Image (cartoon, rainbow, N blue to C red):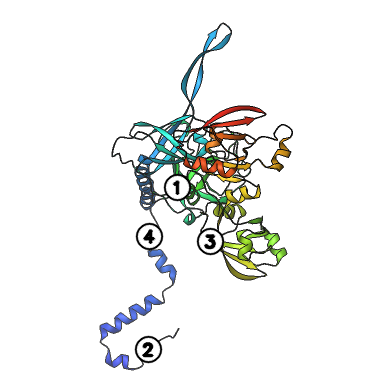
Amino acid sequence: MTSTTASFGSRLKCKFPVFVMAAFVAITSAAILPQSTFAQNSAAPTAADDLQSARALSRAFQRVAKQAEPAVVHITAMRRVPVMQNDGFFSRPTGQTVNQPVGFGSGVIVDSSGVILTNNHVVEVGESHRAKLTDGREFDAVVVGRDPLTDLAVVRIKDAPPNEVFPTAAMGDSDSVEVGDWVIAIGSPFGFANTVTTGIVSAKSRSGVALPGASRDMYQDFIQTDAAINPGNSGGPLLDLEGRVVGINSAIATRAGGSEGIGFAIPMQIAKAVMDSILKSGRVVRGWVGLEFEELTSARLKQLGVTSEGGVLVSRVVDDGPASAAGFQPGDIITRYNARPMTRFSTLRAAIAVTAPGTKSTFDILREGKSKKISVQIADWSSNEAQSMGGQYSDRFGGIVRTIDPEVRRLLGRGFGGIRGVIVQKLDLAGPGAGSGFEEGDIIVAIDESPTRTAEEFAAILDKADMKQGVKMSVIRNRIRGSIDLRTE
């Protein structure tokens, strides 16, 4: 930078008027006054100033609550339970049943047609569901799809009035949320609908959260917050100061059963991807690249001789997988996925899983200390798993079935030599098959009396079937023949 100087010299005395000279002296004197002189003249913030700032923050919270509350619903899960009759010291069933609440939670409307995003654990306990709006109206609601591995579910309001436009909440970008940001949680803790709490983002990319009934395969990449979250808040929105949903409240860490300042929300980037997949395909279509990972600690980074802010170590590259074809090698350190920084294994695993198959994704890696980019076409996790098991994945069934070939007959043992059909190898926990009562190991020999001699025939018959009307499947379980009706909403 070039500095410019001006030299007035003796011309200042004869050329400049007196008032100009006075102004110059005043300015020069001010320029060399000590900073303490100005500090004494600078008024300290008053109590009124502080109160004004606090009121401004309160108004921000009020705007978010007013904007988002109409889109938050109270969800009640219902189940048919037997009516019992007291008979002295005992009670016995009367043979009648009644619809009874068995669970409750919250949800947020994300589409004006009545599409609701909530938690899987809010709806999985019920056979039917009710959604109550802030204006007091109640509607039957149907579960479009659920995903236990992310604890998310999509619900749709049923039998809404013609041309009804439901209030919605705007979806935000959870990647832009920073630790220390203000957030607002809205839900129905302990059944108290439309409760608003505030706090900050305490941490990001939290994993290893012990959730009741959760599978160890669950994808965890939580936003941690100290906004008060209690039972009943589950499924409600976590919002930023602009009123955008940045997370779906899911769990709390507690010893006493209530909020202790440690709550967890599913990031909106994951929630939106799961929702879009369910609405498009009826299930969550997970991405797969054929990599196994290892968490990188500071000690491990030092051992590898790498100077980096963090990353995820590739421990294994699956033969013939997409990553192998793209040139990945064991020992590569992934630092970014689609330009998003990756410092935790849980974050990377979840990000890949919610990427739609067929997407061309970019990995930033470090290899022997040098930066490199690798592009990989994401594959379908379910199809890959089915192939590795020698079977075929069926969307409409929600699981993997395999043709009963000589190898399967050998495993089944004596008495199955003449059986032709398919065996259920794996079920999606939230799929139509599991929901209809199928179990892994079931043998399906016919659909509506049409033989299913191979996995291909099984899939072809289901592809042509009217699943809302349903089909009757002939099943062998534990060497006993029976039938199971399979249908979807």
- Of residues 415 and 473, the one nearer the viewer is 415
Give the labeled residue for mark 2.
Answer: 6
Q: Amino acid at mark 2?
A: Ala
Query: Does 180 sit left or right of 372 as displayed?
Result: left
Residue designated by label 1: 280
Write down the residue under mark 3: 361
Q: Residues within 10 Å of mark 1 (few under 14, many from 20)?
A: few
Disc nearest the viewer among 2 and 1: 1
Please give the residue where the numbered disc 4 appears in the rendered image.
43
Above or below: residue 238 compared with residue 80: below
The answer to the question of whether label 2 and label 4 lie on touching residues, with beta carbons closer than 8 A, is no
Compare marks 4 and 3 and give the one earlier in the sequence: 4
Q: Earlier in the sequence, mark 3 or mark 2?
A: 2
Q: Nearer the viewer, mark 4 or mark 3?
A: 3
Is 35 situated above or below 454?
below
| Circle 2: element type | loop
Examine the rendered structure and indicate whether residue 5 appears above or below residue 117.
below
